[in-house]
Image (cartoon, rainbow, N blue to C red):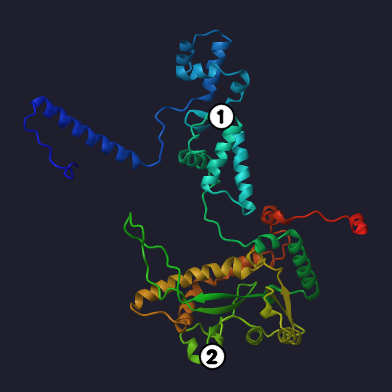
Amino acid sequence: MFGAYPPVSTRGWSASLVTVACRAHDFSSRRFQVSSYRREMVRTFRRKTTPVDKEQLKKAVLAVRRDKMSVSAAAKQFDVRRSTLKDWLKKNNDEIENLDDVVVLHKGHISDSKTEKTLVEYLVHCNDMYFGLSAKETRGLAFDLAKKLNLKVSWEAARMAGEDWLSSFLKRHPMLSIRKPEATSLARATSFNRTNVERFFALLKSVMDKHHFQPHCIWNIDETGITTVQTPNRVIGRRGMKQVGRVTSAERGTLVTLAMAVSATGHSLPPFFIFPRKNFKEHFLNGGPPGCTGVANSSGWMNADHFVQFLQFFQSHVHASVDAPALLKLDNHESHLSIAGLEFCKANGIILLSLPPHCSHKMQPLDRTVFGPLKKSVHTQCDSWMSSHPGRSMTIYDIPGIVAKSLPLAVTYQNIVSGFECTGISPLNPDIFQEYEFLPSSVTDREMPSTSAHLEE
């Protein structure tokens, strides 16, 4: 390893000096190799001693204190290390009685399991409120907790617990894991509250009681965007490379809106495409799913006029009437609230039920169980398309063909039915959401103003 250094002349040196110099070079080389090995060591601690049997340790302590047995004899009889027994003999009786609650917090330092349980509950509670703690924040919290409990820890320099502690903490509590959170806007987090949910289910129940809808008459519609630039799936590459690439069509893609309708019995209608073009042409749908249709506008998004066209497309498949109405559950996007659309629904027996604002991530069946698998399948098909067409860029006219291959894999009977079940729509279940799911909205809770306060104002 010293080939990079200039040669050292040994002319005029004695044999002993040359030997000492060579040994020094050899020692430096070995020391460098050892330090490099230590830097590359995996953070996996393997205990080299047998864990202490707590029951045997208790008996040994009692034998010394009550029966006046010597420390060496008690350690030998109860198979406990002499140094461990001497350490525990220095503690008071309460600590001995609570020995079963003791867990290793860090090498050489201990804390009771009740404290760790409190820490676990706090981490879970923060996560349920969408204010979860990162790995570094958790390590800092552990350091603050140790200081508050007057525990001797070796974390003073970094002012946070070590990575080894965090690793062992997660192993002791398998219910915890490091997760990548999904970005959730403040509007979504606070709008999904018990008041809005109860109000929605009260409306749903009143509509169900009035019209007695069967599952095949309960529908959900929503839109999602399909882009010409996919998110590549994971690939197998060379270990150690900092950057691994996958070919896409462009830096930024062009978006095509896809509107879908599904029923509580697991059925789905052909997709409705909205292309970002001035005028719609039939060849836009070449290779698309059977029965699909489409429209075009300059933005490629749903608008009020095209929503009326979608309602006409929906009516041509469902055949709702005033005598046999259909329930259509949708979000309150402005394109869904036009007068022309409401009049069409009223004339054809389509009952519209709007979701509370910013609650579709929890209460929209398509968002819960269908669009996620569909997007993943579309990205996979896009990867396959790019591999099959090297040197070509994907266009919006290739999207219907990609969607046609993705729909059978994602828009399945099980996914659709699960979406209606997990949102409590069919079968009707107003108590489907647990209390912890409303915790993110608690940050904006306010006390109800009293009547006397209103009178004073």
- In depth, the one of 213 and 112 nearer the eye is 112
Q: Position of residue 447 (x, y in %)?
A: 80, 53
Q: Amino acid at mark 1?
A: Leu
Residue 280's tag is 2
Question: Position of 315 compared to 414: left or right?
Answer: right
Query: Which quarter of the figure has residue 345?
Result: bottom right
Left/right of residue 223 with respect to residue 241 in the rendered view:
right
Rounded to the nearest angstrom, the CA distance separating label 2 from label 1 is 72 Å
The total of numbered circles placed on residues is 2
Residue at the extreme front: 12
Side (left or right) of 315 relative to 246? right
Q: Is residue 64 visible?
A: yes
Name the residue rendered at 92%, 57% in the picture: 456
Where does the image place residue 164, in percent across and percent down from the top left? 46, 39
Determine crowd level at label 1: few under 14, some 14-19, many 20+ residues with C-alpha closer than 10 A.
Answer: some
Q: Quadrant of residue 305?
A: bottom right
Q: Residues within 10 Å of mark 2 (few under 14, many from 20)?
A: some
Are circles 2 and 1 on residues that touch, CB within 8 Å?
Answer: no
Q: In this orientation, does residue 79 appear?
A: no
Which mark is drawn over residue 151? 1
Q: Would residue 306 be found to the left or right of residue 166 on screen?
A: right
Tag 1 or tag 2, which sits nearer the N-term? 1
Spot occupied by residue 37 in the image (x, y as percentages of width and height): 30, 40
Tell me the quadrant of the picture where the N terminus can be found.
Answer: top left
Q: Position of residue 321 (x, y in %)?
A: 73, 85
Q: Quadrant of residue 92?
A: top right
Which residue is located at x 33 percent, y 38 percent?
38
